[in-house]
Each structure stands twice: as structure tokens, then as C-alpha cells.
Image: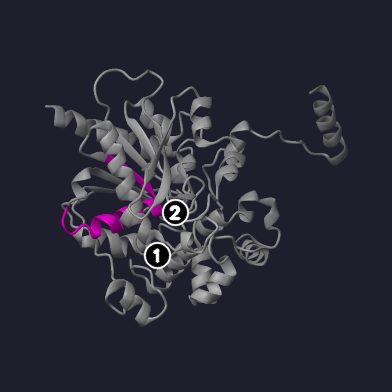
Amino acid sequence: MHRLVALSVLLALVFGTTVRADDPEEHMSVPEIITYWGYTAETIPVTTEDGYILQVHRIPYGKSGPGTGKRPVVFLQHGLLCQSSNWVTNLPNEAAGFMFADAGFDVWMGNMRGNTYGLQHTHLDPNSHEFWQFSWDEMAKYDLQAMIDEALRQTGQTSLYYVGHSQGTLTMFSKLASDTDQTFTPKIRKFFALAPVGTVGHIQGALYYIGEYLGTAIEFLMHLFGEDQFLPGKTIMDTLAAFFCGIFHHSNPLCNNILFLIGGPDSKQFNASRIPVYLGHTPAGTSTQNMVHWVQTVKSDQQQMYDYGSSAENQQHYGNPVPPIYDVSQIRAPVYLYYSDYDWLGDTKDINDHLIPNIKPEYLVGNFPLYEFNHFDFIWGMRAAAEVYNPIINIIKQDVNTQRK
């Protein structure tokens, strides 16, 4: 150890810089991070109707212990290219997962198929082409259903509070919009949408650039992104980094990460010391088909199902040559929107043009524009605790107290 310290000092003297020791959380699993901070962690495997095995992470109670009686369930769902770590990679007084647990809730954190914790299947090999044939359509149809049903089954409750970020809002909007028989909707007591996404026709960032300048031809995008698992090559990454961050983009580590080139690398709220921890867990993976679907959504400016590229294939999948539209006017669960005009991906114009006018007023019960929140400040920003999480905690507590009267 003394030799390592001496070597670090020598390198600092020679090169005029400090050699940073890795934060141990960079290399931990989500349950390891949870227990590292003194909380109880559980991992619950969930199998979807179409065979994907997802690991859901749970913090059943906070530092004060389990107490007595049932605790209200809060389900946290990550966004595009992310995983459940999003909710626990800040310090405990700033991270949603820990804050909700300490506020008295039973916290469940979902993982979608294709990410770090969604790489198993009952019979498909993750190295096979078939495994990766999915987009956010399947996440909305199968993954949310399976995870939420399991959370309710294990806790013996009939409904829960859902907090989604980014793609975690898109999938829930789509799930609720397509719940024509109203069998799923009653399970969502309240839906809190952080950096909400429905349509994305006015976004900034890499997805807009790809859709606008490189097109939506599926074969070309598959070549660009990787055939099955989303693995963009060095050329496209260097091009995007130079385009959005300038030629000397390497001075900002976020500019070398596709996640931040999609959602925006410029945050006014990040705790700089935590950035290596964020980067150690994201991007967490998805399918190329999912990314193609996102690019298609940019071009169509509609909340629409995946376009298979030909009328015949769409007819085969949907019984119609054109992919169906998700009609958010059919949503029947209470929705709360938290958004900002500083967000590249949850764009204010799309929210004002699509979500706000089309979700029925009796269900759009909370509408909260925030100042200078970029897309990731909703999960990692230092102001999120005071301006997003604590207000949500108060709304849930009020609702719980109302139910008990």
C-alpha cells in the first residue's frame, strides 16, 4: 500500500496531476452498493410471459428497521440504457432509492430486458439473434407487467406508487394507454413521471442527429449500432462526441459515453466526485432494435409501435400495414409530470404538445416544470432530493394517510 501511495505521489510530481483511486462503488453490483451504505438488499428474479428473466432489486425498509405493518410500495423504473443502479449511486441523502426507504416505503427497483440485470431467458441464448428481438414495446407489454405483479404478490398489496425516469415513463405511458380492459391500471396508485417521454420529435442530442441526418433504414442502423446488442462502433462515437462536445471533447468524460450524448452531458448539478460511479454502471445495455425504435419515434413524432420496415411485416405483427399509435388519452391513472426546458430528451415542446393536452385533465393531477434540470439531473442532480423526491414523498404520505382515515 505504501508503495502505491509513493507511486501516486511520484506520478503527480512528474505529470502535474493526481492519480485518482477508484471509488469501490464503481465496481459493485446494485445489492452490494445498497449493503455498503448499511441498508438491507434483496434480489428478486422475475420471469416475463415471453421468457425473459429480470432481476428486480429491493430495499424493503430504511435505516430505522422494518417496523410493523405493511409498508407502501414504491416502484422505481430506470430509463434508456440504464439500470436499477440509477437510484442508489448518489449519496444516501441524495439517492431516491435510499430516501424512499428511509421515508418508510418498501422500495422496488426494476430492470428491463437487455440490461446488466436482464440477460437471462428461459430458453433463448443471450448470444443468439432471437434474444435481442425486442424494443420498448415489449418492455411496456411484458416487463412492467411481470415486475409489478411480483412486487404486489410478495408484499400482499393491490397497488403501488410508480416513479419512472425517461424510458421508464415512456413504457408506463404506453402500458396504461393500451390497458383497454383496465386490468393493469388499478395496480398503479399514482404515476410520477421524471423527465417524461411520449413523443420525441423535438429532442436534441444523438438520437435526433442520427434520425435527421442518417435516416431510419433498419439495415443501415443495425450496421451502425451492432446487429443485436447495442454496441456502437468507435467511428460513430467519435463523430457524435465531436459534434456535440467539440473537437476537444475528451476533456469531459461524459462526452465519451453514448448515454450522455443522447441525454445531454452538461449538468449544473452533478456531484463531480460521483461521476466515475455513474460511468461505472452506465450505459447498462439494450437491444439495437430498441435504439432503432427510438430513432423511428424521432422521425415519426408519434408515440408509435415499432415499424418492422415493410407493410407486409407490419401486417403480420399488427394486422395492419402501419404500426399502431399509443393513445395516451386512454390513461386512467393519476399522473404527475416533472420536467425542464433544459432537458435534451424529455423535451418541453413534446410534453406541451403531446402529453399535457392529451392526458385527460382529471388524470393529469400534477404538472411541475423545473428550472435547469438536464435529463439526468432527475436521478443524479443534487437538487433532485429537495425539488423532486421530497415532494413526491409528501404526496405519497398524504395519500397513504387519506386511505387510512
Residue depicted at 54% across the width and 60% down the height: 230
> Could you tell me the amino acid type at mark 1?
Val
Query: Would you call the spot at circle 2 few (<14 residues within 10 Å), some (14-19), or many (20 or more)?
Result: few
The image quadrant where one finds the C terminus is top left
Q: Total number of numbered labels? A: 2
- Queried whether the magenta region covers residue 160, the answer comes back as no
Q: Nearer the viewer, residue 112 or 207?
A: 112
Name the foreground residue: 378 vs 296.
296
Please tell me in which quadrant of the rendered image residue 341 appears.
Answer: bottom left
Mark 2 lies on residue: 123
**Does the segment drawn in magenta span residue 178?**
yes
Q: Position of residue 391 (x, y in %)?
A: 32, 36
Above or below residue 158? Residue 145 is below
Residue positioned 37% across, 18% down in the render: 65
Q: Nearer the viewer, residue 128 or 220?
A: 128
Q: Give the secondary structure at mark 1.
A: loop
Give the side of residue 241 with respect to residue 142, left or right: right
User: Looking at the image, is mark 1 or mark 2 earlier in the sequence?
Assistant: 2
Looking at the rendering, the stretch of residues picked out in magenta corresponds to 161-182
Tell me residue 146's x, y (percent): 32, 47
| In the rendered image, the vertical position of residue 337 relative to residue 314, given as above or below | above
Q: Which mark is residue 93?
A: none
The picture quadrant where one finds residue 223 is bottom right
At label 2, the amino acid type is: His
- The numbered mark at residue 200 is 1
Q: Please tell me which residue is depicted at 34% across the width and 60% down the height of the picture.
A: 198
Is residue 381 among what the camera can see? no
Q: Is residue 343 above or below residue 105?
A: below
- State the SS at label 2: loop
Q: Position of residue 255 (x, y in %)?
A: 62, 55
Q: Is residue 245 left or right of residue 187?
A: right
